[in-house]
Structure formats: C-alpha cells, structure tokens
Image: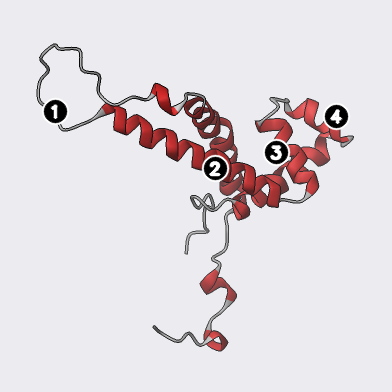
C-alpha cells in the first residue's frame, strides 16, 4: 500500500472544482427522469419477474434470459431508490423539505416555495440550487457532479 503525503496534496487534487450550474442540471434531470423510472421498476414484486416460462413451444436458442435481466434491473432500481432516500436524509432540513416536496410529493416549484414561506426569487436562486448541490454531495451510488474543465 502506498503512503500518501497529505502535506503535498492540495484540496483541489482530492476534490476538483464543481461546475455548479451543470451539476444542478444533472441532479434535477436525475431526480425528475431517472428516479420516477426506478420507482416504477421497484413497484413490481420480484415474484412477477419470473425466469423464462416454459410453454412447450419451441424457441430459438438464446443466451439472454429476460427474467434474470428484469430481476437485476429491479434490484438495481431498489438500490437507487434507497440511496436517493438516504442522500436526501443527509441534506439539511430545508433541502430535505424541497427535495421531498418536488420529487416525492409532486409539488411544483411554486407550491414548494409557497409551502416553505419563501419568495420565488430566493427559492429559485438560493434554496433550490443549494438543495440540488447538497444532494449531489450526498448521493454515493453514482457521481452526479460535473467538474470544471481543466
């Protein structure tokens, strides 16, 4: 194992600078597109995802087993949903509220900032962007950060 001399390592070597705007866009896309799909996939029970059905009819030989693929997709989707919940729980309370309202309760941005008692301007320029960046920092299944070009 290699010893690391932390005296000669800068913070930017370990944590490259994040492009905040692109990271927020990626997180928002992940939460609004990928997460709902993962939730839909997990709504099927594993017993519905049977292996190949044998119906007595001849089939072409194939090495792919759709049943196995569906089970793997289901298990991965469960991991994604659980990790999203875990990541949100690691954010500060205001960010938790925003993310929960937007991506689990189906609130619009307007409903969200009104429920929080915030102005639309402070919500869209401060609170929501902060919540998206916090989520990126707390979500560990994939790296949702976009880093500055060097």
Q: Is 141 or 117 nearer to us in this picture?
A: 141
Mark 2 surroundings: few (<14), some (14-19) or many (≥20) residues within 10 A? some
Instruction: Say which label, 4 or 1, has the lower sequence index.
Output: 1
Q: For the residues marked 2 and 3, what is the alpha-carbon distance in whole angstroms?
A: 14 Å
Name the quadrant of the N terminus: bottom left
Are discs 3 and 1 less than 8 Å apart at CB?
no
Labels 1 and 2: the sequence-earlier one = 2
What whole-number distance in Å separates the C-alpha atoms at marks 4 and 3?
14 Å
The image shows a total of numbered marks equal to 4
Q: Position of residue 49 (x, y in %)?
A: 37, 25
Residue at the disc numbered 3: 99
Q: Which residue is mark 4?
A: 114
Image mark for residue 62: 1
Q: CA distance from mark 4 to mark 1?
A: 55 Å
Mark 3, mark 1: which one is toward the viewer? 1
Label 2 sits on a secondary structure element that is helix
Mark earlier in primary sequence (2, 3): 2
């Amino acid at each position: 194992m290699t010893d690391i001399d932390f005296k000669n390592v800068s913070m930017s070597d370990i944590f490259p600078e994040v492009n905040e705007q692109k990271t927020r866009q990626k997180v928002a896309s992940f939460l609004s597109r990928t997460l709902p799909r993962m939730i839909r996939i997990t709504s099927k029970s594993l017993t519905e995802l049977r292996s190949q059905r044998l119906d007595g009819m001849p089939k072409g030989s194939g090495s792919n087993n759709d049943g196995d693929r569906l089970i793997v997709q289901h298990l991965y989707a469960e991991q994604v949903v659980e990790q999203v919940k875990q990541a949100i729980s690691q954010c500060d309370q205001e960010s938790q509220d925003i993310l929960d309202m937007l991506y689990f309760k189906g609130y619009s941005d307007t409903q969200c900032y009104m429920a929080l008692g915030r102005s639309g301007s402070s919500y869209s320029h401060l609170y929501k962007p902060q919540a998206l960046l916090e989520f990126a920092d707390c979500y560990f299944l994939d790296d949702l950060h976009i880093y500055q070009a060097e």
